[in-house]
Image (cartoon, rainbow, N blue to C red):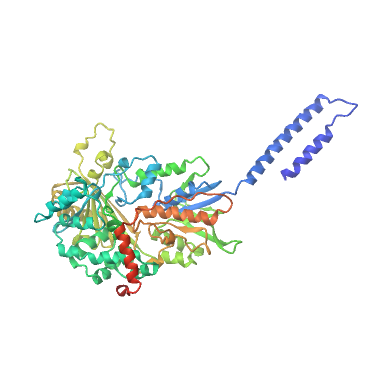
Amino acid sequence: MIKLITPLLIASSTNAFAPSARTTLSHRHASWLQESAESQEVVEEVVAEEESSSSAPPKKKYVVVGGGWGGWGAAKALCESGIENVEVTMIDALPDPTGKTPYLSPTGKPVEAGTRGFWKDYPNINALCAQLNLDENDVFTPFTNSSFYSPDGLEATAPVFGDATVDQIVGGFPFGVGDALKNVLKDANGGSDEFPMLPSPLGQVLATVPYFERLPIADRASMVGLLLATIDCMAGDEQTQKQYDRMTAHDLFLKFRLSERLVSDFLKPTLLVGLFKPPEELSALVVMELLYYYALAHQDSFDVRWIKNGTVSDSLIAPMADLLMEKEDGAALNVLGGCRVQEISVEKGGDGKSHASKVSYLNTKSGEIEEIDNVDGVVLALGCQGMKSVVSASPDLARYPEFSLAASLKGIDVISCRLYFDRKVKTRSPANVFSRFEELRGAGGTFFMLDQLQDESLAELWGLDPNDESVDESSLGSVVACDFYNAGGLMSLADEDIVEILTEELLPSAVSRFADAKLVDSWVGKYGGVVSWFSPGSYTSRPPLEGAGSAKLPNVKCAGDWVRMGEREHGAKGLCQERAFVSGFEAANSLMRDTVTDGPFNEHEVLAVREDEMAVKIGMDVNRKVMSFVPRFWTR
């Protein structure tokens, strides 16, 4: 309409105020002319603005559902894509998914659901630290060893290979073998006392001699069958992996003749705290992936470190949130905390494909149902519980088997505890695993000495102000984070009963010094069905990164550590923060490829883990050739 009015105004003003031969402009006429000219300038400015806005691409609206590592990876990729005129919104049920608001116990102490480690091959999370100008030495502890305890005492200690010396690894070999190996390894390493990087798994095998306190060598040697199965599984195609997925890990252990003691004393407790279920309830495929990624790929693959101060949320998520929410190029992230997605609506598009068009959510702060309409794309960065909730409320999504199957998968119960003691308790390792204790009631258990891992922020662990001169940190005792996984047998217990099991049974049995320590305060958090369960046969039900696929529903993608990434599969495996973060990048990249047609965009870079070692590559190549004519009878 403005474009039609403009020439009429210009034309009428020209005709009305053209000077004649007989008269001159009066003061009044001159004023009218000036006003008309000013009107013309205003109109021309409006027209210019309209033409400028009409030439800009229409706004792209993306919604990320879920504020875990997968959700933040997707939000980061979308906000940093360089798309002109983009709006990115994150929706999460947590009151503050940005990590800026600490989660406190009733007595005002900071707590966290679960203690999460950061392993050697986390290149994309390490790159995030660099982008945020965070010194990794300020964020993470040094790599630490881990100890396994049973009712019989210390069972094994996992060394730190990256910092190990020759004497630490082979010095404990009996009958003079250790001295001979030390000389050989030092000579091969130019006289250095550092333990050299040996072809995997040679270094790991050598470490089992001094670091396994009770497990006989014959039982450890039975692990060879598992190495062969892992190579076969990792070298196989998708059909091979589906065959392994249908087996339980326990069946695989039996067929490859792993000793009963190796399974019960070491593998079972490891899986209970790594995949949160015993081997008889886990897919053999995922167990093989986990063991390869964390233990077999490289000599130092199991080297792990922890958050040095505070929590994962305030150390990494909060600064990343600041970066994305304060972007000045029009792509700032909008975070809606305390909101639960109610429904995702899907409509048929002009291209014959279906498209998510609207996201409805409950704002728990106001109690109102709110909507984001004209949506261009959605990333579902949800776990099994969240997926079930969203799909159950979204009949349009439920029509696609990819989402309804994902919503059918079950989760695992988790219990997190914090214990505060009146004195410091010394332990061999800051990170520890409970093994074979009847008091666990089928759960996996861990305990972390936070006062050792975060010794520079002891006052903060106790909820105290470190700048308060009246605070005497030397008088503060140990703070222990204890976590139970597959905790169904413990969930019905009262909080005080769980604390009593820890303080009266488990901790004193593992480390006798706990018997002399007095409990000062405690906190217990119970989380039902929140962790992904990789059950046998679950592979085909896990959500694909591509959702229902570009041919059917191109603007809905999935992210999280449980997604099937297909051709975009990353080296990080299992229940892994790195894998979840990367899946967010890949989901957003795929979403942009399917929805951005009117301008350029930048895909987020994904850094690969280290290449497989030459010995592993050769082993996989040989395996493929052999298995091309030898039937895999153990997977049938």
Measuring 56% from the left and 63% from the top, which residue is drawn there?
353
**Residue 354, position in %: x, y?**
55, 62
Q: Is residue 636 visible?
A: no
Q: Nearer the viewer, residue 378 or 580?
A: 580
Measuring 24% from the left and 41% from the top, which residue is drawn there?
455
Q: Is residue 223 left or right of residue 244?
A: left
Q: Nearer the viewer, residue 205 or 340?
A: 205
Q: Nearer the viewer, residue 206 or 16?
A: 206
Q: Is residue 123 visible?
A: yes
Relative height, residue 41 to residue 151 (above, below): above
Quarter-of-image position of residue 53: top right
Measuring 80% from the left and 38% from the top, which residue is drawn there?
11
**Residue 82, position in %: x, y?**
52, 46
Q: Is residue 192 left or right of residue 88?
A: left
**Residue 487, position in %: x, y?**
28, 60
Relative height, residue 5 to residue 561 (above, below): above
Q: Is residue 391 left or right of residue 440?
A: right
Of all residues, the one furthest to the right in this rendering is 22
Counting labels gives 0
**Residue 415, position in %: x, y?**
29, 56
Quarter-of-image position of residue 314: top left
Report the quarter where the C terminus lies.
Answer: bottom left
